[in-house]
């Protein structure tokens, strides 16, 4: 439960500290005094996003800190799952810096807003008037029934299965769309693929063909130049080989005169060997180069094929064409294999659908089982709060469709008066009746959950003093099992609290501040008297206040 709440530099609060206790706590104060500020500060501890405008003094940081006693609520696994240090007395702190940045800590360990939200949902339930208006929405109705049926894990398993089923359906739709696109272009893609296969593409083939084409196109020039080169190398007197041979002989004669002459002789010998090798290679090339019109025609045709498909596809190399060929091959294969893939996917979808339907049926069965007990308990509590003839009907119908909540449709109906017909609960109930129904639901849920703290924000809206007194009895009874905090304008509810805080505004040095005061017995009498009869506090109002407290 929440044992203390400290607020510094937040909205109209400069520095406030509430020391809270178990059972039933009351918070009262005039409209605009700042009761909502307390909820705003607490909401920040529970993961709500910070607003820089909420800082009272923009030059100082805002600090909100809550201390929770949690040893009785089996929350160790939540701390472990979120990499947090577990302490039986857990401290949550939120800081809003003047720069606008926000920081959060759980037991002095930095925490994300998501972690605050996870933990906060297990520590405090803040019931606002908005939740009262949500009572007619199916999501809220499912939440209540599922809480009573202990469906948390089952619902999580269902949603996991449902999500997987949706993903398979999406895969199937995508595959069918791809198949339609592939079928529309299949013939053309197959034509392009065969066109490329006909060329028999290989890496490096373009360079090889272009070199071969150059040779075959210039046979006469090649033979003439090669022959001339061989002649100049091999002439008996003026040929390069003869001249170099003479140079070699001259240098050999000088070898005995030193290493430098010997080195020259070796070098000229190497040159002579290289020249002789070149001569042999030139003769080999000369003999190889022959006119071949048929081969020239074949090479030319191959090159024209290459140039044509490169121009057609706006590509520059054989490597690019090979990539295109592989891509076309995949598209054609996809089209060929699409039916098999669709058939296999349909089998997976049926399996997933069967699994999801099974989980949905389990949800339906468990919900159906708890509904009679819920209706009976709700009607009993409504009798206690002045609705003795009210009847509640919960219609739960299983459909063939899947939703995030299962395959069910739910509708709560109310017959508020004896002999009246059932109608949608939100339409059939007045504002005051909705408040009482909401309280009945919260009272029932309190027996099933281990939630430490519940806060009612003006749940008494639209009810008379007599009804409010009866609602207070319910909240007081809830306080035996959990910490209940009620923000109220009605003295009949305020009088039933075990503890009482007053929120009020006061001006100090021309600056308005919100203050919070825990009231003693005499102060409670004065507060209740003011709530009953105004600031005058007549003798009858004081007497009535004492009577309510007793």
Image (cartoon, rainbow, N blue to C red):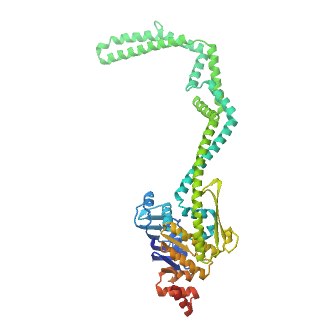
Which residue reaches farthest bottom? 539
* Residue 536 coordinates in the image, percent (x, y): 57, 91
Q: Give the quarter of the image for residue 76.
A: bottom left
Task: Give the percent coordinates (x, y) of residue 251.
Answer: 35, 13
**Whole-percent x, y for residue 42 in the image:** 50, 70
The number of numbered badges drawn on the structure is 0
Report if residue 487 is visible in the image: no
Residue 79's image quarter?
A: bottom left
Vertical placement of residue 173 versus 86, above or below: above
User: Measuring 70% from the left and 70% from the top, which residue is drawn there?
Assistant: 421
Closer to the camera in the image, 57 or 429: 429
As displayed, is residue 412 above or below residue 325?
A: below
| On screen, residue 417 above or below 107 | below
Name the residue: 32% across, 16% down: 262
Q: Nearer the viewer, residue 137 or 394?
A: 394
Residue 167 is left or right of residue 236, and the answer is: right
Q: Is residue 358 left or right of residue 273?
A: right
Asked if residue 88 can be seen in this view, the reply is yes
* Image quarter of residue 322: top right
Residue toward you, 443 or 339 = 443
Q: Residue furthest top?
A: 236
The residue positioned 57% from the left and 30% from the top of the image is 319
Q: Position of residue 303 (x, y in %)?
A: 63, 23
């Amino acid at each position: 439960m929440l044992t203390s709440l400290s607020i510094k530099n937040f909205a109209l609060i400069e520095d406030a500290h509430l020391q809270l206790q178990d059972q039933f706590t009351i918070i009262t104060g005039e409209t605009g005094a700042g009761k909502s500020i307390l909820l705003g500060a607490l909401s920040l501890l529970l993961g709500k996003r910070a607003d820089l405008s909420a800082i009272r003094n923009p030059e100082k940081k805002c600090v909100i800190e809550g201390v929770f006693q949690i040893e009785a609520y089996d929350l160790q696994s939540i701390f472990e799952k979120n990499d947090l240090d577990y302490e039986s007395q857990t401290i949550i702190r939120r800081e809003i810096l003047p720069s606008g940045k926000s920081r959060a800590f759980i037991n002095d360990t930095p925490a994300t807003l998501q972690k605050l939200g996870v933990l906060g949902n297990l520590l405090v339930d803040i019931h606002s008037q908005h939740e009262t208006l949500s009572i007619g929405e199916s999501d809220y109705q499912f939440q209540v029934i599922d809480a009573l049926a202990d469906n948390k894990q089952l619902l999580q398993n269902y949603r996991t299965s449902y999500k997987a089923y949706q993903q398979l359906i999406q895969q199937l739709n995508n595959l069918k769309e791809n198949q339609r696109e592939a079928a529309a272009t299949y013939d053309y893609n197959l034509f392009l693929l065969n066109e490329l296969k006909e060329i028999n593409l290989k890496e490096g083939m373009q360079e090889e063909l272009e070199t071969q084409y150059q040779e075959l196109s210039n046979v006469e020039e090649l033979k003439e130049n090669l022959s001339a080169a061989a002649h100049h190398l091999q002439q008996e007197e003026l040929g390069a080989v003869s001249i170099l041979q003479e140079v070699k002989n001259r240098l050999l004669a000088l070898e005995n005169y030193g290493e430098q002459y010997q080195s020259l002789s070796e070098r000229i010998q190497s040159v002579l060997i290289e020249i002789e090798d070149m001569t042999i290679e030139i003769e080999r090339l000369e003999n190889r180069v022959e006119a071949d019109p048929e081969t020239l025609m074949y090479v030319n045709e191959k090159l024209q094929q290459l140039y044509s498909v490169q121009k057609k596809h706006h590509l520059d190399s054989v490597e690019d064409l090979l990539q295109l060929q592989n891509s076309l091959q995949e598209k054609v294969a996809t089209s060929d294999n699409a039916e098999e893939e669709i058939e296999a996917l349909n089998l997976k979808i049926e399996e997933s659908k069967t699994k999801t339907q099974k989980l949905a049926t389990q949800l339906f069965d468990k919900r159906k089982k708890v509904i009679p007990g819920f209706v009976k308990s709700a009607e009993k509590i409504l009798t206690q709060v002045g609705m003795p003839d009210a009847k509640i009907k919960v219609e739960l119908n299983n459909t063939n469709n899947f939703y995030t909540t299962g395959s069910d449709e739910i509708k709560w109906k109310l017959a508020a008066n004896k002999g009246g017909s059932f109608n949608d609960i939100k339409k059939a109930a007045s504002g005051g009746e909705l408040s009482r129904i909401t309280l009945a639901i919260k009272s029932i849920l309190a027996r099933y959950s281990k939630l430490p703290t519940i806060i009612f924000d003006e749940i008494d809206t639209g009810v008379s003093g007599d009804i409010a007194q009866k609602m207070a009895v319910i909240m007081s009874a809830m306080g035996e099992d959990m910490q209940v905090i009620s923000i109220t304008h009605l003295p009949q509810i305020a009088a039933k609290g075990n503890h009482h805080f007053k929120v009020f505004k006061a001006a100090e040095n021309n600056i308005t501040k919100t203050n919070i005061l825990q009231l003693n017995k005499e102060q409670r009498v004065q507060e209740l008297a003011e709530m009953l009869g105004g600031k005058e506090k007549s003798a009858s109002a004081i007497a009535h206040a004492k009577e309510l407290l007793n």
